[in-house]
């Protein structure tokens, strides 16, 4: 059995700026850049970005995303996160979607 800290989990992350301006898409784009630079395996889709990593890696990424929103003085935003974890084994997004590609 893998150590829990080494287990890979799958997360879906969605940043939703509540600002009604053209800047909303720019905020989302910069958030995706942070995910891309994280080094974690990820897949960008129209509504969210799926990320594979350990609990610690994903929590660090979420902290970085939150810090970027604060740095940009984003007044209101939602950070929606969904996790799939499994007791004793890693969960990788590609394994869940491979049969559909």
Image (tube, rainbow, N blue to C red):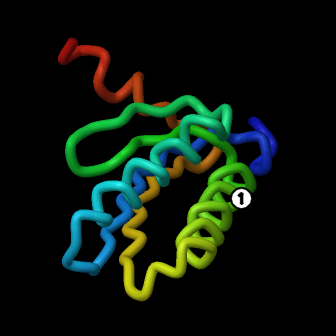
Write the residue at 27% across / 79% down.
Answer: 19
Give the quarter of the figure containing the N terminus.
top right
Left or right side of 5 for 12: left
Image coords of residue 55 (percent x, y)? 67, 54
Left or right side of 99 for 66: right
Image coords of residue 22 (percent x, y)? 23, 64
* Residue at the farthest front position: 22
Left or right side of 76 for 99: left
* Residue at the farthest bottom position: 75
Check the image and report above or below for 80 versus 3. below
Check the image and report above or below for 53 versus 70. above
Image coords of residue 59 (percent x, y)? 66, 61
Write the residue at 81% across / 43% down.
Answer: 3
Q: Quadrant of residue 83?
A: bottom left
Check the image and report above or below for 21 versus 34. below
Instruction: Identify which residue, 65 or 23, lies in the foreground.
Output: 23
Q: Residues within 10 Å of mark 1 (few under 14, many from 20)?
A: few
Image coords of residue 7 (percent x, y)? 69, 41
Write the residue at 52% across / 42% down.
Answer: 33
Q: What residue is shown with label 1?
A: 60
Callout 1: helix, strand or loop?
Answer: helix
Q: Quadrant of residue 63?
A: bottom right
Instruction: Identify which residue, 100 or 46, lies in the foreground.
Output: 46
Write the residue at 31% across / 65% down.
Answer: 23
Instruction: Identify which residue, 19 or 39, lies in the foreground.
Output: 19
Give the quarter of the figure containing the C terminus.
top left
Number of numbered discs overlaid on the protein picture: 1
């Amino acid at each position: 059995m893998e150590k829990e800290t080494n287990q890979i989990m799958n997360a879906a992350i969605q940043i939703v700026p509540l600002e009604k301006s053209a800047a909303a898409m720019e905020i989302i784009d910069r958030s995706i850049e942070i995910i891309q630079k994280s080094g974690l395996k990820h897949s960008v889709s129209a509504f969210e970005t799926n990320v594979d990593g350990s609990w610690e890696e994903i929590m660090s990424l979420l902290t970085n995303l939150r810090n970027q929103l604060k740095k940009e003085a984003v007044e209101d935003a939602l950070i929606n996160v969904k996790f799939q974890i499994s007791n004793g084994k890693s969960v990788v997004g590609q394994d869940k979607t491979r049969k559909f590609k």
